[in-house]
Image: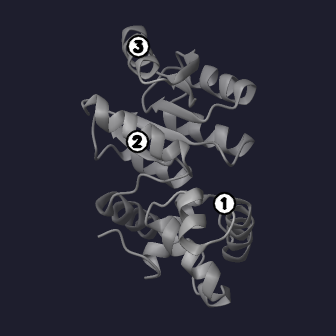
C-alpha cells in the first residue's frame, strides 16, 4: 500500500484527493495545510510519496520541498501546480522534486504519477528537463561536468536507465542484478558525480548526452 502525504491549503481539494487515493487502495497518512506542517508530517511519518502544492501559506512548496529533502534526501515529492510554466516548479525540480502534475490533470494521470514515483521514477518530460537545464545555465548555476568518464560501463547504463524514468526494480530486471546492487551503484554514482538526488542525476545524464527523453 502506497502511503501518501497531502500538502495543500485548500481543505476541499485535500478531501477530494483523499477520496480518490483511498479508492485506489492508497493510504493518506497525513494532511498539511501549509509548508511548515508538510515538513513536520514528512519528518514524522516518512511517506512513500508527498503531493506538494506549489503555493501555500507560511512556507511555499519550493521551500518546503527543499527542507524535506535536506532532512531526507530520499523523499519523493510530486509538485501539484496550476501552471506548467510556473517558475516555482523549476525551482522545486532543481531542489529534487521528482516532477509535477497539473491540478487539472485527470485522475488516471495523477494515480499513474504517484505509482511511478513510489516505484522510484522521476517524472521528467523533455521540455521540463530542458527548461530546468536552461535555468541552471542562465543563473550560472552548474551541475558538475566532465565527470562521467569516471563511471564504468555498468554505472553509465544505470544512470541512463534512471534518466529514462526506470525504477530501481526495472533497472535491476533489465541488468539482471539485485535492487540492492542498483541502490548501492546509484549511491556510488551520486558520489562520483557530486550529485544529491535522482532528479539531478537525470538532468545530468540528459545534459551530458548519456540519455535522452524522446
Where's residue 206, x and y in %? 43, 73
Front-lying residue, 166 or 7: 166
Q: Is residue 103 visible?
A: no
Front-lying residue, 181 or 38: 181
Q: Mark 2 and 1 residues: CB-CB less than 8 Å, in contact?
A: no
Real-space Cα distance between discs 3 and 2?
A: 17 Å
Q: Badge 1 is on which residue?
A: 196
Q: Check disc 3: other Cα within 10 Å, few if <14, some if 14-19, many if 20+.
A: few
Q: Is residue 188 left or right of residue 145?
A: right
Q: Badge 3 is on which residue?
A: 19
Q: Badge 2 is on which residue?
A: 113
Secondary structure under tag 2 reads: helix
Q: Check disc 1: other Cα within 10 Å, few if <14, some if 14-19, many if 20+.
A: some
* Residue at the image position 42 percent from the left and 10 percent from the top: 15
* Residue at the image position 58 percent from the left and 29 percent from the top: 1
Where's residue 4, x and y in %? 55, 27
Amino acid at each position: 500500500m502506497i502511503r501518501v502525504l497531502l500538502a495543500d491549503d485548500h481543505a476541499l481539494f485535500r478531501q477530494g484527493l483523499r477520496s480518490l487515493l483511498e479508492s485506489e487502495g492508497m493510504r493518506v497518512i497525513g494532511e498539511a495545510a501549509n509548508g511548515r506542517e508538510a515538513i513536520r508530517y514528512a519528518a514524522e511519518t516518512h511517506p512513500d510519496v508527498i503531493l506538494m502544492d506549489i503555493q501555500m501559506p507560511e512556507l511555499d512548496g519550493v521551500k518546503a520541498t527543499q527542507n524535506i529533502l535536506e532532512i531526507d534526501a530520499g523523499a519523493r515529492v510530486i509538485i501539484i501546480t496550476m501552471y506548467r510554466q510556473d517558475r516555482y516548479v523549476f525551482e522545486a525540480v532543481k531542489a529534487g522534486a521528482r516532477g509535477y502534475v497539473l491540478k487539472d490533470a485527470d485522475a488516471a494521470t495523477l494515480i499513474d504519477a504517484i505509482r511511478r514515483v513510489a516505484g522510484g521514477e522521476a517524472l521528467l518530460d523533455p521540455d521540463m528537463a530542458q527548461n530546468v537545464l536552461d535555468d541552471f545555465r542562465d543563473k550560472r548555476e552548474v551541475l558538475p561536468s566532465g565527470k562521467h568518464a569516471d563511471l564504468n560501463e555498468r554505472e553509465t547504463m544505470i544512470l541512463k536507465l534512471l534518466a529514462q524514468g526506470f525504477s530501481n526494480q526495472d533497472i535491476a530486471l533489465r541488468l539482471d542484478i539485485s535492487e540492492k546492487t542498483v541502490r548501492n551503484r546509484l549511491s556510488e554514482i551520486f558520489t562520483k558525480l557530486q550529485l544529491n538526488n535522482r532528479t539531478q542525476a537525470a538532468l545530468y545524464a540528459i545534459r551530458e548526452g548519456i540519455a535522452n527523453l524522446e
